[in-house]
Image (cartoon, helix red, strand yellow):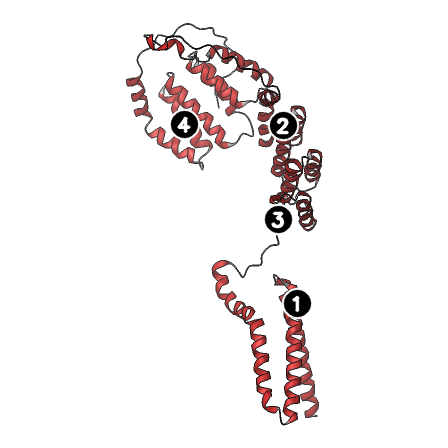
Amino acid sequence: MTNHLVYILDTSLAVIALVAMIFLSLRALKTSDDPVNLIIRWVVTFVVAVGGFHLALRMCQGGEIGWMAPFVMVGMGVTLSVMWTPSISELVSRPLTGFFDGGLEPQDPKPLYSTAMARRQRGKYLEATIAIREQLAKFPNDYEGICLLSRIQAEDMKDLPSAEMTINRFCAAPKVPPKQIAAAQAQLADWHLQLAQDTDSARAVLEGIIARFPNTDLAVAAGQRIAHLGGTEKILLARHDPQAMPVPPGVDKLGLMTSTQFLVPEEANPGRLAGEYVEHLNQHPHDTEIREKLAVIYADHFHRLDLAVGELAQMINLPNQPPKRVAHWLTVLANLQIRHGADYAAVRQTLQKIVDTFPDLPVAQSARSRIAHLALEFKGMKAETPGVKLGVYEQNIGLKYGSPYER
């Protein structure tokens, strides 16, 4: 009976040891950086251990060459130590170093594009795209891989239709973040402009962003780019059809002249610029860059702070604008108010709006500091600015809006 119990206990322990060995082996294969190398070492270890023990046993039974058995065992130990010492050292040290470098946390698998980028640098563009697609097969719709693939297709292989197909397929996939879609489409619009000189296709792509994400900051950015496509088109046409630039003749006897003031280039006429800006805004009312310039002209040239306030108020009250841009427009408004005679209460209200609307931005701290020193700033402006008699200007300059800056 006792022998049966010992047999059962030994068998149970052997089964437990075998299961534990299998579990640890599978876990080691799963976490190993090179599972093939690990399997090879296991096979070599099994062959060396079984073959070495069998050879040593035969030597011991042979009698005359039994003295060689210890050397065989030492050779086995050296061979196994060379193969397994680095792994054992890492196994012992990993719990200690893991507390400092996060080594105990399992690493999320990530796509590797180093091979593709190396092939691209060597000019092997087709091989690079194959390497990228291999990674995308494991990590579908990876944004970095899509960008790299489309960039190689468009910029290196000069195959814009394939790049457009890659981006459109990515943008049509479910659960793609809107910012990634907008960024990919914006890059596609850039390629239509830079590579194909096709402003119509670029405009269509940007209008697609507005249609897909209406009333968002992404739509605002796309609309801003559409507003400036006209200037981009002129630059692109000038590259392909350069016009001769007339050079005026030089001035004779320049050194004998008492004054050269007439040679100074004339500054752009603010009134003409204002008219051009108004016409541009009739076509692109959401172009905040031009509207800000128009507001500054209204205040600094025409001394019409009310019109400048109206222009800035339109931008400040636009929905879905980035906080930094709104804070910038409020700062511009405060500067114009100080320069053009607004009272202390109005300027303080503008600065306080920055603090109340964006309390967590660095600009809020700047506004608080400026409010604290606002009285000194007003006193300095009065000391530096002499009295200026303003002329009478047309009251309906440019665009008119129903209400100035209000909240």
Mark 1 to mark 4 CA distance (whole Å): 65 Å
Q: Residue tagged by mark 1?
A: 26
Residue 13 visible? The answer is no
* Residue 113 tag number: 3
Q: In the displayed structure, would residue 42 be above or below residue 221? A: below
Q: Looking at the picture, does residue 321 appear above or below residue 283?
A: below
Mark 2 or mark 1, which has the lower sequence index?
A: 1
Which residue lies under the disc numbered 2? 193
- Outermost residue toward the left in this view: 383
Residue 236: where, in percent of width, then height?
A: 60, 23
**Distance in Å between CA atoms under marks 3 and 4:** 49 Å
Picture coordinates of residue 279, whole percent (x, y): 56, 13
Q: Nearer the viewer, mark 2 or mark 4?
A: 2
Residue type beneath disc 3: Tyr
Q: Residue furthest front?
A: 253
Q: Look at the numbered disc 4 and give the secondary structure of its residue.
A: helix
Q: Which is nearer the N-term, disc 2 or disc 4?
A: 2
Identify the residue position indicated by label 4 in the image: 351
CB within 8 Å, label 3 to label 1: no
